[in-house]
Structure formats: C-alpha cells, structure tokens
Amino acid sequence: MSKYYPPGVFLVLAVLLMPFETNAQETAASAYGEIAISEDSVQLRYIRPNVQPAENVETGQLGFGLFLNEERDIVASTNYYVEATRLRINRLSFMVGPVAYAALLSEENQDVFALALGAEARFRLLRNPRVDLVGQVVYAPDILTFGSADNVWDVVGRAEIPITDRVTGFGGFRLFEIDLVQGKTELEESVHLGLRYRF
C-alpha cells in the first residue's frame, strides 16, 4: 500500500471495543469495527462480543483481522478472548484466549500458519475525559507454528480516547514479527493511528 495515500481515506472505516466492566451495557449486543494505519501498513478488525460457540464454553469475544503492509505481506487472524474476572483489579481488566494466524508473505514459498496464546490488559487511566491504556501480547511457540516459520510475536500498546458515542480514536505502537526458519521478518514496527466504531 502506497505511503502517499491520504490517511483520511482509511479513517472513515471503523473499529473494535473490548467488553470490560466499564462498558458492559454498550457491549451487550454491539459489534465493533476497527482500522489502524501506519506509514507502511493497514490493519482491519471486526469484533463480536458475547459469543458462546458451545454450551460448555464460556461466553467471550470473537474477532477477525486482516493485515496488509507495503511489502504485500498479507496476514489473516482470528481470536476468541474471555475476560479473566479473577484478575480484575479496580480499573484494570484482562482478557485471554487463543489466536490463529495465516500469513502469505511476499517472499516466494514463505507461508505461515500459527496457533498462539493472546492476552490483553485495559487500564482506565482517566474517567473524565475518558482515557484507556491498552496492551496486547500474542505469542506462538515453535511447536504451534507451521510452514516456514519458528514463532510469531505480536505486541501492541496504545491509548484510546472516545470521540463520539460510537467512535473512539486511538494511537500507539505495534511490533509484529515472524521468526522464519532462515532469518526474521518484521511485518510492522511502527507507530499507528486508528478509529474504532460501534455498530
């Protein structure tokens, strides 16, 4: 994707909001869309809260993502997070769950599939105006990484500020890399800006 495309073209798309206790009523029935752009990449995500895939599985948050960078690396992802209620501390909340990645890298014969464990922490820094700090870490070990890679790291830190009742703006930093059998590829290591929209 060309770095010269105006960011405004992407910022009309929209975004994800995590269902923690401070947003329980909002997340009860609403899905979320999110777009994050950096100098060389774009990430789209769709989140559906309150999903229960089976009777004996705890209700959680189902998400889908699509990542594209300027090198034409394409990564599709999906996750299922549940809130770690026993770890909730005042304004701090956690979500954990499995994540899957399918990557078509720009280099020939460099395709990757990985099963990972992800965790997200959300801290309500300010109540009025509302400011949330969010950290996400996803790691896929060698034993669960298939194809031409050994493991996958995806680390995000960002701040979120509501703009309207439905729209939230955010900005932060992402490190997204895949350790290949030979060498390493950094899909993203940069600052990003974005919007999240509640449908």
Image (cartoon, grey):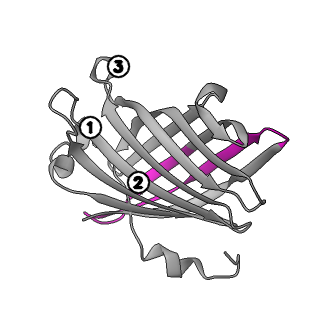
Residue designated by label 2: 64
Tag of residue 60: 1
Amino acid type of disc 1?
Answer: Gly
Where is residue 155 shown, x and y percent of the image? Answer: 60, 40
Whole-angstrom CA distance, mark 1 to mark 2, is 14 Å
Of residue 5 and residue 63, the one placed in the foreground of this image is 63
Disc 3: which residue: 87
The x, y position of residue 125, in whole percent, is 42, 39
Classify residue 60 as left or right of residue 104.
left
> In which quadrant of the rendered view does residue 137 lie?
top right
In the structure shown, which secondary structural element does the residue marked by tag 3 occupy? helix
**Is 188 rendered above or below residue 97?**
below
Residue for point 62% across, 28% down: 141
Query: Please, what is the three-letter code of the amino acid marked with disc 2?
Result: Phe
Q: Residues within 10 Å of mark 3 (few under 14, many from 20)?
A: few
| Residue 179 painted magenta | yes
- Whether residue 117 sits left or right of residue 154 in the image: it is left
Mark 2 secondary-structure assignment: strand
Camera-near label (1 vs 3) is: 1
Q: Is residue 58 visible?
A: yes
> For the residues marked 1 and 3, what is the alpha-carbon distance in whole angstroms?
16 Å
